[in-house]
Image: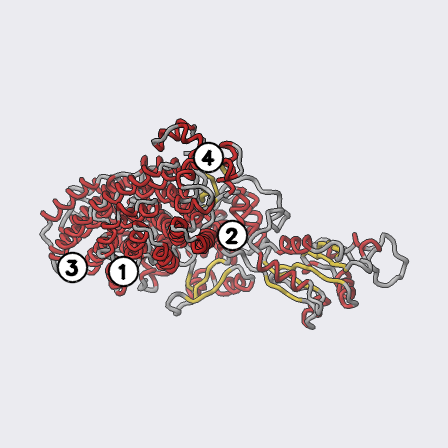
């Protein structure tokens, strides 16, 4: 794996703007400011926004884009220092000498404009303009012919002459807000010159509050590092002296009472307004609010007004300036305040436990365990691990005769650590309580947690299966037997043993009634097994039924939320419902980013990677291969180059998409990495690794090997009960030109796999096996209706070739035109079926030889690969060069590269 490298240093900034960063991400705002400036009925525009949001950046771009032949742009910057000097902001634009007692000055000749060009005054920080300069600018605009392009900071007042023009409608005012998430991604990727991981970009956007200046400082501080071609977020925001100085300047001077308000919020936000009044005083809270250092909003129930700091970085700076002893005192005081109200809300338990733990005092292990469950229910792995670890060690410190709930604490901690990709630590936590389990509940929780750690974390699925089977045989409580059997269904499915998984679920249901959390585990296991087993309609219905009463089980088994999103994703995938599948992956990614708005939970590397991998697969089916590559790399980056579940999914999809883009070397490298990191324990969810092999071979020109690999993949999927993947593998053989060899099996699957996609695949096989141009065009239209544009283009290209072989040249031309239009919507796609589009003058054999020669294979190597003579290869190459108008292998390589 490539070594990590820090963010390259961007160009130096002005004090409160992002400097000479490339201008991206403000297209809409740019057009609005330009339109306002050029409005013939107005005198210009003032752009208003917070410090660092990019006002000057935007205004400078607008000014730079003006036609210099029609506009004379002069620049001025108002400052607080110059505000004490008459005409201080405009001194450089005025004549060097003026007669004593003369009236208001005029601009110096060279900057006054002329008959050919209109004067545009680009004025930065207009709120700091001195009165004399403001009057001169107002007079200049009132006379007409000039334009003002000004910036001002939110919360300030512009001088009266400009305010009057705005009130009269002669001066536009546009509010510039922070960058949105998509704008931030575009800016970051332009600056670093590469792909930024989705989670990292989202975290930077949140931490910086969409402020380009803060983004720049965070990048300079090394918050993004490059690893394996993807830029990832490296931990929390680093407080460099420069960033701290910027934030402190934005907060401004505060007195001791105001500082106390900020400290309480930095350590405990959001805080109830009434409680904060009690802790720090209503007057101080009011002053902080008036200075817009905090925001106020109702809580989720609408019953309480809650306060937060106005910017995420305020908390970082305030905490850094709060000593450890005062911080602990504040934490204890907040805990006491909540306890004094009775702590009736569920979030009160979590907050009190966290504050008590962080304050360093002794905390009741029962409180810590309840809080750990609540953090787990919010999918906050970092906090759940801290609280769970504290609870476990508090229980273990008790005498043996008072063991408490050590077994429950260890099982919860191990589960959390597993999903945080810390499986060795999870195993250690379970070992600590192996001899202290008190009842079937603890034994069931312990066995279930260890089964997941062994199978999903350590790739020891057979050992996990034996462990869960032994637990099911020894636990006497039917509900907890059902728990371990349901998890055995999960383990079997992930390993690709669908029949074993369905058997485990059937046995789980036979155990009868159980708490809703346990039955939700059974329901989700069944939905997953049906999705992979070719019953996507049933899987979606089961997932939706389970979600209808999620409030009854979410706190106990929140991970079921992610397994249901998993089930719905793959169900829609195999049904050919691509938009619905992408929506399901979006819900999955939102889950692991955090259930609390504006907060990233952290961790969840493997689960987050899975949803990125499925997004890649869905985009690949749509023909958006570049987006598939992007999401594949995003998922791969989350796995940090180690053997992990879903490495085969992400790297397999990367290999497949790269191969279908004609990037054979990249595809081979991804396939090799996938093979090195995947394990049999994850065969079911990592089957993309198997599906990629035919396409990598096809990218290298080994068409026969590609077909053989597709047939092997179909056999593999069939043996494991993975009917959806069997359908894809068999249909890949159709796309690779071997429809006759898979027609019967695809027809069988069309009757077994629910949804619209399987029958279309079977009809494609039938139309291609006994070539029928009309039927192929009909299939093309069906694929287009499903949004599978690459598949539609391939079927149309096959139809064109069929018509051409039948001598129907006009119909062939129309089909080829349809294929080309569809392929144009799949940029870069280079599959074998599309070869006639790039080289229509060549025969199929000539196209095959041309592709191999373009890759640099010698005549001898091509002859061996295709089992033909070297003379035949040479003769074909002469014809190929002549028909394509190229010279030699380098010319062929350029031809295919340019295609």
**Image-based side of 39 in relation to 450, left or right:** right
Q: Which residue is mark 2?
A: 184
Q: Earlier in the sequence, mark 4 or mark 2?
A: 2
Q: Who is closer to the viewer here, 174 or 860?
A: 860
Q: Which residue is mark 1?
A: 540
**Proximity of marks 4 and 2: CB atoms separated by less than 8 Å:** no
Q: Secondary structure at mark 1?
A: helix
Q: Position of residue 827 (x, y in %)?
A: 47, 49
Q: Position of residue 460 (x, y in %)?
A: 22, 39
Q: Which residue is mark 3?
A: 514
Residue 521, image quadrant: bottom left
Looking at the rendered structure, which numbered label has been put on residue 455? none
Q: Earlier in the sequence, mark 3 or mark 4?
A: 3
Q: Nearer the viewer, mark 1 or mark 2?
A: 1
Q: Nearer the viewer, mark 3 or mark 4?
A: 4
CA distance for labels 1 and 4? 46 Å
């Amino acid at each position: 794996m490539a070594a990590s490298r820090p963010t390259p240093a961007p160009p130096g900034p002005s004090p409160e703007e992002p400097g000479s960063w490339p201008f991206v991400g403000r297209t809409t705002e740019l057009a609005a400011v330009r339109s306002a400036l050029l409005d013939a009925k107005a005198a210009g525009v003032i752009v208003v926004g917070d410090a660092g949001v990019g006002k000057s950046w935007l205004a400078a771009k607008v000014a730079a884009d003006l036609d210099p032949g029609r506009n004379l742009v002069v620049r001025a910057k108002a400052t607080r220092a110059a505000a004490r000097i008459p005409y201080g902001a405009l001194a450089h634009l005025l004549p060097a000498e003026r007669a004593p007692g003369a009236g208001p000055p005029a601009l110096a000749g060279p900057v006054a404009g002329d008959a050919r060009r209109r004067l545009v005054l680009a004025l930065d920080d207009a709120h700091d303009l001195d009165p004399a300069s403001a009057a001169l600018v107002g007079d200049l605009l009132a006379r007409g012919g000039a334009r003002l392009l000004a910036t001002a900071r939110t919360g300030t007042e512009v001088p009266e002459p400009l305010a009057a023009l705005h009130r009269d409608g002669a001066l536009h005012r546009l509010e510039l807000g922070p960058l949105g998430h998509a704008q931030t991604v575009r800016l970051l990727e332009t600056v670093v010159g590469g792909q930024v991981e989705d989670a990292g970009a989202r975290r930077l956007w949140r931490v910086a509050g969409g402020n380009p200046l803060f983004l720049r400082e965070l990048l300079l501080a090394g918050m993004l590092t490059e690893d394996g071609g993807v830029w990832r977020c490296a931990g929390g925001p680093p407080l460099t002296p420069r960033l701290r100085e910027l934030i402190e300047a934005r907060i401004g001077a505060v007195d001791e009472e105001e500082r106390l308000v900020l400290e309480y919020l930095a350590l405990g936000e959001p805080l109830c307004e009434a409680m904060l009044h009690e802790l720090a005083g209503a007057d101080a809270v009011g002053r902080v609010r008036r200075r817009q250092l905090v925001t106020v909003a109702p809580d989720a129930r609408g019953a309480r007004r809650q306060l937060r700091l106005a910017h995420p970085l305020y908390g970082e700076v305030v905490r850094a300036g709060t000593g450890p002893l005062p911080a602990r005192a504040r934490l204890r005081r907040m805990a006491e305040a909540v306890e004094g109200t009775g702590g009736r809300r569920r979030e009160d338990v979590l907050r009190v436990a966290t504050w008590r733990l962080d304050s360093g005092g002794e905390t009741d292990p029962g409180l810590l365990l309840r809080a750990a469950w609540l953090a787990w229910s919010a999918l906050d792995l970092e906090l759940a691990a801290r609280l769970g670890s504290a609870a476990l060690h508090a229980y273990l410190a008790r005498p043996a005769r008072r063991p408490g709930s050590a077994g429950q604490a260890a099982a919860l901690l191990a589960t959390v650590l597993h999903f945080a990709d810390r499986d060795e630590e999870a195993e250690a936590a379970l070992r600590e309580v192996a001899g202290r389990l008190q009842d079937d509940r603890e034994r069931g929780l312990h066995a279930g947690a260890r089964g997941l750690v062994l199978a999903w974390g350590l790739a020891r699925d057979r050992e996990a299966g034996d462990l869960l089977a032994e637990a099911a045989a020894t636990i006497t409580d039917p509900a907890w037997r059902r728990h371990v059997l349901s998890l055995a269904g999960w383990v079997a499915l992930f390993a690709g043993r669908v029949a074993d998984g369905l058997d485990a679920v059937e046995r789980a249901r036979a155990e009868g009634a159980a708490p809703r959390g346990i039955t939700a585990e059974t329901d989700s296991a069944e939905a997953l097994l049906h999705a992979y087993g070719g019953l996507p309609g049933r899987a979606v219905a089961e997932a939706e039924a389970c979600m209808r009463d999620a409030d009854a089980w979410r706190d106990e088994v929140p991970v079921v939320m992610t397994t249901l999103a998993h089930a719905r994703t793959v169900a829609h995938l195999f049904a050919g419902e691509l938009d619905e599948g992408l929506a399901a992956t979006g819900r999955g990614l939102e889950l692991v980013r955090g259930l609390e708005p504006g907060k990233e939970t952290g961790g969840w590397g493997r689960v987050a990677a899975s949803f990125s991998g499925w997004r890649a697969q869905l985009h690949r089916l749509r023909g958006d291969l570049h987006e598939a590559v992007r999401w594949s790399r995003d998922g791969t980056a989350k796995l940090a180059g180690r053997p992990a579940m879903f490495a085969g999914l992400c790297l397999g999809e990367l290999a497949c998409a790269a191969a279908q883009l004609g990037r054979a070397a990249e595809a081979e490298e991804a396939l090799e990495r996938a093979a090195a990191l995947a394990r049999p324990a994850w065969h079911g969810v990592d089957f993309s690794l198997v599906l990629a092999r035919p396409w990598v071979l096809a990218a290298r020109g080994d068409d026969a090997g590609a077909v053989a690999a597709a047939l092997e993949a179909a056999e593999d999927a069939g043996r494991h009960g993975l009917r959806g993947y069997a359908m894809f593998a068999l249909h890949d053989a159709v796309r690779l030109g071997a429809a006759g060899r898979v027609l019967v099996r695809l027809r069988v699957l069309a009757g077994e796999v629910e949804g619209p996609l399987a029958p279309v695949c079977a009809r494609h096989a039938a139309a291609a096996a006994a070539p029928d141009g009309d039927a192929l065009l009909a299939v093309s239209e069906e694929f287009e209706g499903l949004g599978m544009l690459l598949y539609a283009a391939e079927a149309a290209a096959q139809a064109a070739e069929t018509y051409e072989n039948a001598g129907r040249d006009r119909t062939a031309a129309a089909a080829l035109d349809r294929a080309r239009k569809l392929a144009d919507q799949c940029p870069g796609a280079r599959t074998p079926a599309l070869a006639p589009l790039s080289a229509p003058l060549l025969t199929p054999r000539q196209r095959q030889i041309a592709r191999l020669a373009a890759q640099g294979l010698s005549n001898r190597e091509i002859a061996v690969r295709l089992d033909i003579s070297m003379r035949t290869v040479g003769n074909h190459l002469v014809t190929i060069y002549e028909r394509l108008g190229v010279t030699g292998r380098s010319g062929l390589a350029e031809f295919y590269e340019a295609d």
